[in-house]
Amino acid sequence: MRAVGVITEYNPLHNGHVYQLQQAKALTGADCTVVVMSGNWLQRGEPAILDKWTRAQLALQTGADLVIELPVFYAMQPAHLFAQGGVRLLAELGCESLVFGAEHPDLDFSQLMAAFPSGREAFKQFNATYATLFNAALKTATGQALTKANDMLGFCYYVANQRLGAPMRLIPMQRLGSDHNDTAIQGDQFASGTAIRQAALAGNWDQVERVVPAETLAQLKSNRLVSWADFWPHLQYQLLTTTVDRSGQYDQMAEGLEYRMQDMVQNASNFEDFLAQVKSKRYTYTRLQRVAAAALLQLTTTEVQTAQARPYLRVLGFSATGQQYLHQVKKSLTMPLYTKINKDLRLHELALDYRAGRVYELINQQHQDLYRRPWRFTDNLG
Amino acid sequence: MRAVGVITEYNPLHNGHVYQLQQAKALTGADCTVVVMSGNWLQRGEPAILDKWTRAQLALQTGADLVIELPVFYAMQPAHLFAQGGVRLLAELGCESLVFGAEHPDLDFSQLMAAFPSGREAFKQFNATYATLFNAALKTATGQALTKANDMLGFCYYVANQRLGAPMRLIPMQRLGSDHNDTAIQGDQFASGTAIRQAALAGNWDQVERVVPAETLAQLKSNRLVSWADFWPHLQYQLLTTTVDRSGQYDQMAEGLEYRMQDMVQNASNFEDFLAQVKSKRYTYTRLQRVAAAALLQLTTTEVQTAQARPYLRVLGFSATGQQYLHQVKKSLTMPLYTKINKDLRLHELALDYRAGRVYELINQQHQDLYRRPWRFTDNLG
């Protein structure tokens, strides 16, 4: 059996994602589609609108064969680390290729990587703060630019894959329909996640149903939808009671930013207001949102880096094909494979994902780890 | 001018407290009544039902001349440290005497202190956990027992005062009416704070009005009443996201208790349920409640001990007499006297009280430090 991988967030799963899953198989002739998906906390430092189990179920219902959780210590990171995490897990699972959407699938990533300022070391430092500077240099050197979010992410996949010795073939796909950050649903069939979330939170179901599969629509209508606003009281409380010594240790906190955050929280009336007050030219909203999420989860840089040194494969669900594939690759795995959580894992290996899930549970009131087993779509019951 | 002091919590201020204020003047012939009162968090590790400003106002309306806040690092401590804090502040303010209620005002404290097992060192260790053992030894040695909460507290006042060189004369007063922990209002005029809080939270105003002054009744009826239940979501969130390394540093956390607390919080459905699950023979409810409050406020032992080494006088209000008295003693004070908070004090000297107040504000939505000035009942406008 041959597998193709995709790295996703499915926030929520929409028609563009279904199309991508179909194309992944069509373009590669693979038997099995492996999805590495962020858990309950996402790359841009925000909670998923639907929990990881619901989103994994949707993935299996619409074409995925195996869904693996991208641990929070990779998921809630700048693009290059997010990409590194996803690529590591897919490569570990023996995927032959990685399909991803890009605004400009014809970009020459190898040329870009060659022009990449000072090689590996610079890449290590590479995050949103450096993106603008980096792009200017790149444009001068190659005539190509990485101004779009998915082009950038694609490049990060490319670099991560190269650094592993290029185990996978990278297949960029033209993104369809709306731009990643469009806030309104305009198309007939495709829309951005941002636009879909806004419409869903506002209850504009006639708009939502045009751009998501029926399964997603049903889940959005029947679940408690989660957004940052839900966690604001806890974030506020946390920043009011912690010390700057402590908050300075939160992951991705920049020098001095802890003072600014603990000062601005004094008078902020909601999460948006808080971020707007903290915002300066020095930091992007995404960066600040990730730091806020790290504060909320009390996630320290030390914890994140320690965890990144020992990744694992956490299975959220599989089809009959996925199960077969898992059986095929199991023996050659070097990372631990987890299908359920016990007290020992909760306190150690899976502690950060467990914590992230437990905070999410405070809002959606659904168990995220304890008492959960992977979805088994093995009898075509899905 | 001569001053008499009382150490109080006023949770809430009731007829017994008014009587005590009257007697304090009558018994001593003092011109000025100085009240040292816990702020928003109390000795038994719980939030006050009314905030410190409301309670200070009630004190001034019913006979107090000067109200000083007992800082949280003294207020939310075992009896001996609570007493030590109160006695230090009253002595610093030059009070000649300290009046307090006791179940057995005829107890011979000097005899008890002489019989106190191994003197000062043992007293240092003395807290609720040791109370039972300690009392058995005491009973054998002296025939006297300290089984009642206010007798015990009175003894702590006595020891604290002796250790300062006995600057004040101690005047125990017979407590009237109900026992400290009675949970029902039975008397016609006097009831315990516990019983009054329960009746007020249940809205049984006909019961409450018999045992509190009209001013207290009006405040209870018009304010957002605060109890532990209000803070449970934040405590739960805190214990779910912190690490045992961190929670082990919380003030009064006993060895291993942090594991128990972080384990029990997983399935607790409310604060009472949580405490009941954590409870064992080894710890009293009061002790556990204080640890829970320290966790909520992220108050560490280091912070508390550092703060105890540099106490201050925080003025919550005064009458014309209190103002005059303050003027009289001002020059001889060795502790700083604060009447308002600024950014520097908020971040340093007053940081713990500010933090405790800020958490309280999350529920009652009234500023506790910023924008507040001491009550001035200097023109009999009160």
Image (tube, coloured by chain):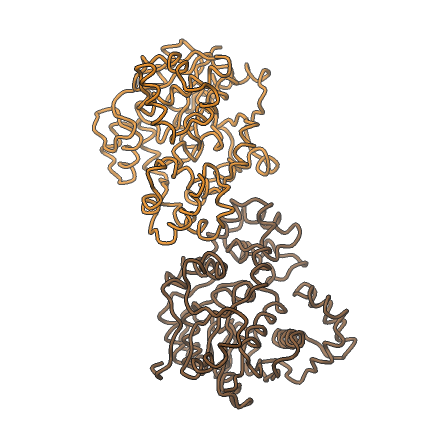
Chain colours: A orange, B brown
Residues B102 and B299: in front is B299
Q: Position of residue B134 (x, y in %)?
A: 73, 69
Q: Position of residue B210 (x, y in %)?
A: 44, 81
Residues A142 and A40: in front is A142
Residues B308 and A238: in front is B308
Q: How many numbered circles are shown? A: 0
Q: Is residue A347 left or right of residue A320?
A: right
Q: Is residue B283 left or right of residue A71?
A: right
Q: Position of residue A64 (x, y in %)?
A: 41, 21
The residue at 50%/81% (across/down) is B16
Q: Which quarter of the rendering shows the C terminus of chain A? A: top left
Which residue ends up furthest to the right in the rendered image?
Answer: B141
Q: Is residue B188 visible?
A: no
What is the quadrant of residue A253 in the picture? top left
The residue at 35%/12% (across/down) is A108
Which residue ends up furthest to the top in the rendered image?
Answer: A29
Q: Position of residue B351 (x, y in %)?
A: 48, 58
Which residue ends up furthest to the front in the rendered image?
Answer: B331
Q: Is residue A168 visible?
A: yes
Q: Is residue B264 left or right of residue A279?
A: right
